[in-house]
């Protein structure tokens, strides 16, 4: 019998303290806390490294498919590839659905406006669709949801489907309507009871939704989305059990529709933490079966970080987001088409969105590995940290009367709006980066007529008058996009000329910084290799008919070059200094007003430049 070879026995174990001391030594005096500890906006810190001793207690004691389902609801990791169809014409919607199914989509979500709920509509949109092989989901006007669901079940029975095998959902979420449309739906518990009764023979069909993906799209932090989602779901558990429904029944009818941000590892941890915490909540209601404690999650890539400019980068964002959800083991995923910001999804955009998931399945084989993140020191620690912060938020809401009360009092709306404002400020100051928007824009790109789409409910069953405070859903990039569109619509494209002089390394670095800075407003940027004198640089700038001249040099050399260049330019162009040199007070005393550097508010600075340019 061969002895098992033990590798690396000759190496002595290294303690966490030794690792930290080595890092401190390599920092050469820099502050360890400031340089190496990531102080997240989620309310906790992330260390530069994790070791086995950092694993939370009990994190690896369970298997996929076992309570509390941190590692997944089932032993496999296959998920449904979903795409949404929002086409009013039933025949067109049906043709689109059959095309998508033939191309590999196995989950469809239909948007159903109130006026479409007729006995003829369902047979038309589902003609030729095998409801036992494809997950079918319906986003129906709340005022028509019971009528629609009744017609749907009648259709399934008439067509001879085994309704016990039918998977899908009806997206009934009255609190979402209050949060985002300002419409208070009174008797929502009675509607929920009617839906649950109607679908009682369909154990794989869910009819009460928690649409916390809308919080993600409004800019909420990960821990906010999760904490609010738990309280949101618990609100439905509480009201429906108080109305006489068994907890097993209501819990098995709730579906969580969650967003996916681009924070790759945190999103993996969020979904794992979500299942664990929801299982603990449902357990407190003493269900007859622990299977009722499973959180069923549909994940959708975020719309908050999508951009109008450099739109193909949206594919990169949605790809990593979909990968997070797939690794985390959700039940289904929707990848938002890359062009959703400015137009109805084209066939090409829909095909790319679908293929992004098929790549994860058929090339990366993520559906073949259950909980691949399990046991990772980093992700297990993130899971515990996110769970801890989300739980604090959940308890705070519950201790103050529950989620619906917080919505009625405007607390949720205020907190999400505050977070979105905070994130926009961070974007404006480049503390948060959105590629192609506030950093590394495509210098030559024009909008070519693209404009942001406006969002509207469109169900037609409510008046326009809002009955409660609402959360505004605005993408992160919108302010920068409006600035850039404003520049385009002015009918001129200002030229920003880099007057590079002096120290080679500094002038190149500052020219690159300034080009990226000014191109985010849609300006034409003109970089240069360097000038031997101020006079040469000024002449070249005026010959180029520059609207803005940016002097790029080292801090020490600005004392020599900046004032002569400013005086030579005069009122022929706006003069800007790249940097914040020690001699700034002297430069300001000479009349120089404009400085761009890492500490300025990029958005406000560019707005001011547009104002000076008469745009």
Image (cartoon, rainbow, N blue to C red):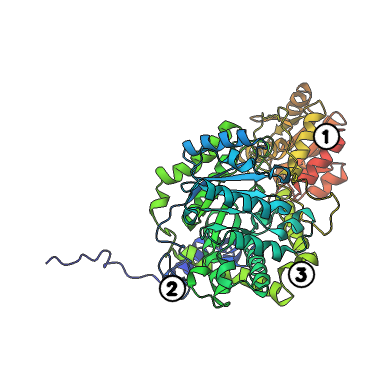
Q: Residue 342, position in %: x, y?
A: 69, 36
Horizontal side of 54 relative to 206 (left or right) equals: left
- Residue 62 image-quadrant placement: bottom left
Element carrying mark 2: helix
Please name whichever residue, 50 or 212, is drawn nearer the observer in this view of the structure.
212
Of marks 2 and 3, which one's residue comes earlier in the chain? 2
Q: Residue 108, position in %: x, y?
A: 55, 44
Q: Nearer the viewer, mark 2 or mark 1?
A: 2
Q: Residue 537, position in %: x, y?
A: 73, 28
Q: Residue 158, position in %: x, y?
A: 53, 47
Horizontal side of 439 relative to 97 (left or right) equals: right
Is residue 49 among what the camera can see?
Answer: no
- The number of discs equals 3
Please name whichever residue, 537 or 329, is drawn nearer the observer in this view of the structure.
329
The residue shown at (67%, 55%) is 146
- Assess disc 2: are there few (<14), some (14-19) or many (≥20) residues with their C-alpha within 10 Å of its C-alpha: few
Q: Is residue 206 above or below residue 121?
A: below
Q: Nearer the viewer, mark 2 or mark 3?
A: 3
Please name whichever residue, 463 or 412, is drawn nearer the observer in this view of the structure.
463
Q: Point out the residue furthest to the top here.
A: 543
Element carrying mark 1: strand
On the image, numbered disc 2 is attached to which residue?
53
Horizontal side of 60 relative to 176 (left or right) equals: left
On the image, numbered disc 3 is attached to which residue?
405
On the image, numbered disc 1 is attached to which residue?
574
Q: Nearer the viewer, mark 1 or mark 3?
A: 3
The residue shown at (74%, 53%) is 143
């Amino acid at each position: 019998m061969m002895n098992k070879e033990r590798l690396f026995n000759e190496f002595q174990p290294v303690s966490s303290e030794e690792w930290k001391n080595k890092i401190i030594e390599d920092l050469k005096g820099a502050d360890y806390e400031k340089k190496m500890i990531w102080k997240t906006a989620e309310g906790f810190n992330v260390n530069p490294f994790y070791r086995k001793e950092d694993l939370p207690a009990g994190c690896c004691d369970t298997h996929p498919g076992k309570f509390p389902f941190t590692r997944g609801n089932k032993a496999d990791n296959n998920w449904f590839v979903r795409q949404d169809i929002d086409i009013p014409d039933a025949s067109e919607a049906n043709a689109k659905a059959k095309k998508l199914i033939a191309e590999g989509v196995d989950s469809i979500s239909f948007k159903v406006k109130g006026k479409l709920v007729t006995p003829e509509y369902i047979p038309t949109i589902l003609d030729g669709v095998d409801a036992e092989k494809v997950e079918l989901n319906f986003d129906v006007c709340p005022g028509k949801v019971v009528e629609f669901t009744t017609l749907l079940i009648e259709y399934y029975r008439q067509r001879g489907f085994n309704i016990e095998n039918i998977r899908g959902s009806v997206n009934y979420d009255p609190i979402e309507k209050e949060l985002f449309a300002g419409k208070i739906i009174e008797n929502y518990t009675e509607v929920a009871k009617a839906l649950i009764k109607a679908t009682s023979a369909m154990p794989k069909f869910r009819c009460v939704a928690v649409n916390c993906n809308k919080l993600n799209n409004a800019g909420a932090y990960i821990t906010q989305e999760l904490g609010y989602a738990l309280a949101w779901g618990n609100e439905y558990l509480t009201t429906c059990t108080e109305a006489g429904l068994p907890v097993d029944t209501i819990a098995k009818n709730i579906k969580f529709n969650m967003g996916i941000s681009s924070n790759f590892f945190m999103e993996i941890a969020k979904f794992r933490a979500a299942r664990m915490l929801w299982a603990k909540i449902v357990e407190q209601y003493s269900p007859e079966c622990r299977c009722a404690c499973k959180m069923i999650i549909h994940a959708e890539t975020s719309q908050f970080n999508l951009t109008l400019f450099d739109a193909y980068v949206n594919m990169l964002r949605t790809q990593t987001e979909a990968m997070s959800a797939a690794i985390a083991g959700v039940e289904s995923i929707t990848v938002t088409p890359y062009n959703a910001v400015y137009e109805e999804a084209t066939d090409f955009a829909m095909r790319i969105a679908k293929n992004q998931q098929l790549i994860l399945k058929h090339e990366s084989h993520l559906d073949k590995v259950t909980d691949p993140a399990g046991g990772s020191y980093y992700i297990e620690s993130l899971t515990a940290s996110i769970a801890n912060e989300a739980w604090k938020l959940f308890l705070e809401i519950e201790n103050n009367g529950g989620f619906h009360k917080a919505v009625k009092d405007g607390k949720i709306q205020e907190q999400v709006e505050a977070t979105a404002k905070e994130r926009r400020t961070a974007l404006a100051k480049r503390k948060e980066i959105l590629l192609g928007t506030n950093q590394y824009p495509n210098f030559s790109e024009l909008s070519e007529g693209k404009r942001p789409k406006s969002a509207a409910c469109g169900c037609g069953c409510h008046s326009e008058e809002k009955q409660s405070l609402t959360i505004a859903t605005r993408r992160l990039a919108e302010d920068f996009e409006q600035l850039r569109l404003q520049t385009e619509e002015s009918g001129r494209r200002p030229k920003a000329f880099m007057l590079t002089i002096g120290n080679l390394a500094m002038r190149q670095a500052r020219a690159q910084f300034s080009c990226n800075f000014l191109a985010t407003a849609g300006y034409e940027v003109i970089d240069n290799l360097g000038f031997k004198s101020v006079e040469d640089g000024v002449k070249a700038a005026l010959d180029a008919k520059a609207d803005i001249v940016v002097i790029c040099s080292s801090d020490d050399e600005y004392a020599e070059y900046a004032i002569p260049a400013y005086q030579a330019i005069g009122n022929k162009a706006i003069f800007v200094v790249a940097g914040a040199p020690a001699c700034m007070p002297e430069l300001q005393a000479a009349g120089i007003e404009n400085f761009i550097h890492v500490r300025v508010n990029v958005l406000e600075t560019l707005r001011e430049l547009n104002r000076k340019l008469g745009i």
